[in-house]
Amino acid sequence: MPTRRRFLATLGAGVATASLARMLPAQQAMQGMNTGTANVPMDEARYRPVRLPSRGTGPSMNQAQRDALEHKIHCQCGCNLDVFTCRTTDFSCQVSPPMHHDVMALVEGGYSGQEIIDAFVNVYGERVLMEPEKRGFNLAGWFMPFVALGGGTALVIALLRRWRHPAPAAEPDSVAQLPVSATTDELKRLDQLVRRDDE
Amino acid sequence: MILIGELSLWVALLMAAWGTTAGFAGAYTQRTELIASARRALFAMCAFVVLASIGLWTALLTSDFSFRFVASYTSANLPSVYKFTAFWAGQEGSLLFWALILSIYATIAVYTGRKTNRELMPWVVPTLSAIALFFILVLCFGANPYARLDWIPPDGRGLNPQLQNPGMAAHPPNLYLGYIATAIPFAFAVAALITRRLDAEWLSSVRRWVLLSWFFNTVSIVLGMWWAYVELGWGGYWAWDPVENASFLPWLINTAFLHSIMVQEKRGMLRKWNVTLVVSAFLLSIFGTFITRSGVISSVHAFSQSAVGYWFLGFLIIAIAATAYLVSTRLSDLRARAELESMVSREATFLFNNLLLCGIAFSILWGTLFPILSEAVRGTKITVGPPFFNQVNIPLGLGLLALTGIGPLIAWRRASVRNLRRQFTGPVVCGVLVGVALLAFGMRAYYSVMSYALGGFVLATILQEFQKGASARHRMYGESYPMALFRLVARNRRRYGGYIVHIGVVVLFAAFAGLAFKKEFDVTLRAGQQFSAVDGFGDHWTFVSQGVSDYDELNRHTTAVLLEARRNGKFVGMIKSEKRQYIDSQGNPTFEPATEVGILDKPHEDVYTVLAGVIGEDTAEMRITFNPLVWWVWYGGMIMALGGLIVMWPQAERRRAQAGYMAPLAPGLVDAGAEAAT
């Protein structure tokens, strides 16, 4: 009959195997890529135009707001930086400058920050955001740390309460587990003798 | 020497294999000759790994480009110091460096513990040999630093310019020293689990190693932050990059252990938990190595991707399975024996401290792996960047900062209301005053206000502890206050060294809170043109471009822009930022151009300039950033490291005896003893 421990062990092994299987193609794909200054895979073809027709209403925000918006958009050159930081750091990057020009054109075209973000997500997918959107499966990403912390807090409080009010002392394991080489009859007689002594 | 080194690697493999096999067989069958043989094999393995390392260093320093590793990471014109540090610049060399430190650590641990840990050592030796065997196997069959090229190139590819920096010369060795030190406590934990000798004795053997790991990890993280700040040019020191996160995880777990071990020592509690922490720190170190080398997650710090990642994944799975089995089958031996007298006690506070440290570790691990999970579940790639980690971890970090102050003030076992009032009144008033003052001065970055208020509270608690201790010595021994303070720390290194670490934590939090007032500007300046801006402190700055210049240096072609900086109309200095194109000895460009930032550093603020590009001949595209309180990140780190050193510093037995009380012996006893001796 399967025990809980065996079930957990099997589950763990299954998850590990599945993870390994999923990682294999990812790693093989990385091996073929060129690497840039810091061994980051550089792929200039990752740039894709994000264009919308101008509304003709003038710029929707000032430069500081536009820079703040670029901090929310992930450069697609392979680095882990946002568009603003990458274009103002790495002058060899061929991806962040055109992404910056797209942001400028959309700002000039009168689009709001959210509309520009949405336009980028439509073209590149969610990976273009520096943080996952707070909806759907991503909520698990956002809230799991707090759920785990809440669970941990509950566990710690439960442990403290248990230790604070300990259960009545059980018989020591060492006594209960001592090997006894006696028959049931002999044990009964011993028990009666002990009781008689107590009386 | 190179040939000897190459052969030594294979002999080391044999030694590690014998040490593992004979060690486990000897420990299991209790055959002393096998146990002794395994111990000698471990020492021999160390000697051969040292020889293998000397061989590789010789190849690097003599520019022997017949070796793929040497040709890949050095060039003939590379300065000698960077030829030396190129040892850990690439996959193969860094793995040999892992094996080198591991074998030296293992030798020290086994040699120094041969008399004190007789029951555990037979299992510690093969466990350490098995870990070393894994690394040497990877070296011999997965990433051999002695692999040769079919032809000898005239020059090597050179070292990545970003690694040609003192920070990067020192950061990896410290990181490895920290990472690998977790292997020793792990081996002791495995030995204690196997032998079921899970009392506090094995913990005392590993505490010093955990401290060592914590110390080097702290130094390496701060050095890594400094390197990222001065070299990468993105304007900050911590980007929540997967590899940065991986280096932070063992540090968090070790910190948790260094607190929870006190609970076990004082009260006999948390035995399961402490074993779990020791094991987790090692597994997370291996996980960090796996992340860096597998290519599973892209990172600016990653080595070029190779199949070595699979080796680490396999090792990680085996290590997790083996330790999970050992812990789960020894739960009854790990049962706590003590009871909690009060919920308001230091042991309860330490539990919450552990909860927050592990909570932060979990959130970082979760955020790092969530992109993989998202892709596996939804098939959608996402990015989990700094905004996620900051939003999740800032509240947890502030909670931890508060506990840093609360913990030391609460008594062990039970704290009375009177005791709490006496201990907390001053620090709480101090914290509230700091918070109110900042709000009154118009600070509206609420996380920063909380950070400074809590920092004031924690600092007051620490100063109160020092003041009470020094006053007590002054009264009891008539020592002057500076002497009393010195002796207080010297004779209670563990406690007061810990407080010094806490001061470093407060300084770091104060520096991190300053980031809320960071300001950055994207500017284009022709020669003679000026740019004006106001920083977070309200100072008016003017920067005048002195033009763009091009020149050749040692092994690079440099483009530089010089800015004259004035604060409130007063000249404060010149700031130069550069782009460097490195070249090999034939004059051919190597790598992409590298950034050299310009920094005008002051205790309250750094002015940080990056040359992003040049238009025409004299127009520079630049980013100018005002980074408040960055200086304090480095000094906070140094204070933490100093505190760690004080805690680690061995307390001489002789001095300890002198520090205690001495009862005079009866004259007759002394005479009798003297007679017996003669």
Image (tube, coloured by chain):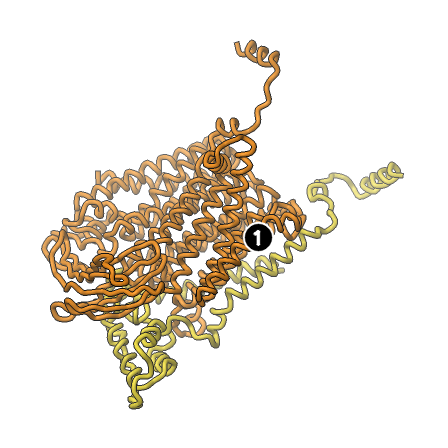
Chain colours: A yellow, B orange
Task: Check disc 1 and report the residue beneath it.
Answer: B351
Farthest bottom residue in view: A56
Where residue B235 sits, quadrant-wise, is bottom left
Q: Depth check: give the residue in front, B429 or B104.
A: B429
Q: Depth check: give the residue in front, B619 or B388.
A: B619
SS assignment at label 1: helix
**Is residue B661 positioned above or below B174 on the image?**
above
**Is residue B248 positioned above or below B614 on the image?**
above
Relative to A8, is B48 on the left or the right? left
Q: From the top left corner, tell me how far across and down residue B419 is, in percent.
A: 63, 47
Kind of residue indicated by mark 1: Leu
**Is residue B263 positioned above or below B560 on the image?**
above
**Is residue B513 positioned above or below B334 on the image?**
below
Q: From the top left corner, tell me how far across and down residue B607 is, in percent.
A: 28, 60
Q: How many marks?
A: 1
Q: Residue at x 32, y 36 (%)?
A: B47
Look at the image and tell me in which quarter the C terminus of chain A lies.
top right
Subunit of label 1: B
Q: Residue at x 31, y 67 (%)?
A: B534
Look at the image and tell me in which quarter the N terminus of chain A lies.
bottom right
Q: Residue at x 14, y 67 (%)?
A: B527
Q: From the top left corner, tell me how far across and down residue B105 is, in percent.
A: 39, 40
Farthest front residue in view: B569
Q: Is residue A13 visible?
A: no
Q: From the top left corner, tell me how far across and down residue A127 is, in percent.
A: 37, 73
Q: Is residue B521 visible?
A: yes
Q: Residues within 10 Å of mark 1 (few under 14, many from 20)?
A: many
